[in-house]
Image: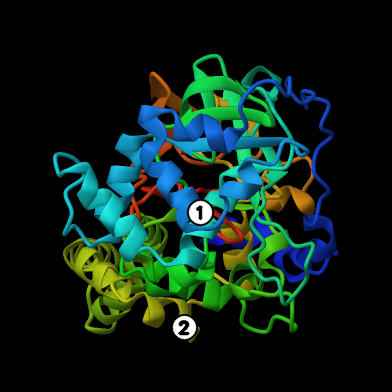
Amino acid sequence: MKSYKNYLKSGIAASLLCMGIISSCNKAPDEIGMIVPPTQSSLSAIGDTLKLSADDSLFYKVIVRGGMLNVLKDKSKSYTLFSPNNAAVRQFVSGASGGLIPPSGAPEATYVGFINGSLPVASAASIVQYHMLPQAVSASAIPTTFPNLAYPTFLNPSPSASPLLRLDGYVSRRANGAWLNNIPVIAADRMAGNGVIHSIAAVSVPPSTLLWDRINADADLTYLKAAIQRADSGAAPGTSLQYVLGTQAIAPGLNLTVFAPNNAAFRAALYAQAYPIVYGQLYQGAYALAIAGGALPADAAIAATNYANANAPTQTTALTSDPVAFFNNPALYPYLPAVAVKGILVYHVLFGQRAFSPNIPTTATAVPTLLNSVVPTHPGITLSATFTGPVVTAATVKGIANATASNVLINPLPNGSSDQHYVNGVLHKIDQVLLPQ
């Protein structure tokens, strides 16, 4: 823990979130030199094209349910539609029904019945709008730069706040495919009279909650929560990590990637840092007691060593077993002050970048973190991913001082551990705490 303190004692964390961070996060969309012109009007509009497509019949029902059909039939406009195929919509219906409807095998009328009778109209409209871009964008025109292109969708998450507000979709392309957020494009560039259709492998449900909502409620992130609260102690209003992670008013303008160490990762890291301290205290106490009892120094040293070896593991485990108690233990403040905790935490955050797992390079690549905002020369973290086709099957993130890379715990399902999408960013659980030095 002393190394963390030395590294960050210059006040990194005290100033880290006071740097105009909120204004800088509202970056304008990247230059869109990739927009293709509208296709020939003799082609059927997107709405009519989907109506005639057997594998788009269920998403067509969602479009109709949401009142978006006339928009997608308007040939005076140009759109990109990411259209989940029927298998994807069946999976969505199964989840939305709480598993009452199977993800496959039920009669088509069962899925249609749920869409028409149980899916709220507003929800259907939001889903369709989140799959729409206001220009026609071919797959080949999507850039390959890390991590992706933030492109405004049709969905306004809060019309009362601003009629111009839009949620972004995050489109990306690599040698092995293209994606909307983390969802693979399975058939690209189906041209229509008012734009282009890309078929995708899942429904991309628009995010509605915040990163802090997940951290605050997840039983496997209690150490991360306690660390954030410790880091924020004494922070000025509007500068805390919790404010950035959990404030709805600024959320739509943020793009954050949080690599979130789970509880096991924190316990291991805290144990490794606390053990020498506990051992030293036990040794000193036992040595002093032995000397006071008349033991020779050599004998006292042996006795103290035996005592510390026997008791340090259990006492260190007890010390680090309760995250709230650990991070609020005044006896530990000299070893791990709030400024050091904040510096470690921001090393787990990419700011201005919402990196989904398919955006992670296949070769180890250094990426700057939020820590680089005040330490520009820091090497950052190193990311690497393994793909099977367009799907990430393994990914790692390595801190500069970690002996080995941490694993991203791959499970992109709702309430899973990777590609967890929120209004203000994306969260990936990892199995080590990343060390900046």
Residue 186 sits in quarter = top left
Q: Nearer the viewer, residue 401 or 82?
A: 82
Residue at (18%, 54%) from the top-left corner? 101
Which colour assignment does the render follow?
Answer: rainbow
> Residue 58: x and y, percent?
36, 42
> Residue 365: x and y, percent?
60, 26
Residue 425 sits in quarter = bottom right
> Residue 240: x and y, percent?
67, 75
Task: Please give left or right for residue 399 compared with residue 103 in the image.
Answer: right
Task: Please give left or right for residue 4 compared with residue 290 in the image.
Answer: right
Task: Please give left or right for residue 164 compared with residue 6 in the image.
Answer: right
In this rendering, the count of numbered labels is: 2
> Residue 201: x and y, percent?
40, 33
Q: Nearer the viewer, residue 104 or 354?
A: 104
- For disc 2, the neighbor class at 10 Å (few under 14, some 14 to 19, many from 20) is some
Residues at circles 1 and 2 in contact by the CB criterion of under 8 Å:
no
| Residue 246 in view here | yes
- For disc 1, the neighbor class at 10 Å (few under 14, some 14 to 19, many from 20) is many
Q: Earlier in the sequence, mark 1 or mark 2?
A: 1
User: What residue would you read off at disc 2?
Assistant: 328
Measure how far apart labels 1 and 2 are at the Cα level.
43 Å
Residue at (73%, 42%) from the top-left corner? 134
Q: Which mark is residue 127?
A: 1
Residue at (75%, 67%) from the top-left corner? 17
Disc 2 on helix, strand or loop? loop
> Relative to 254, is 243 above or below?
below
Task: Please give left or right for residue 390 compared with residue 172 in the image.
Answer: left
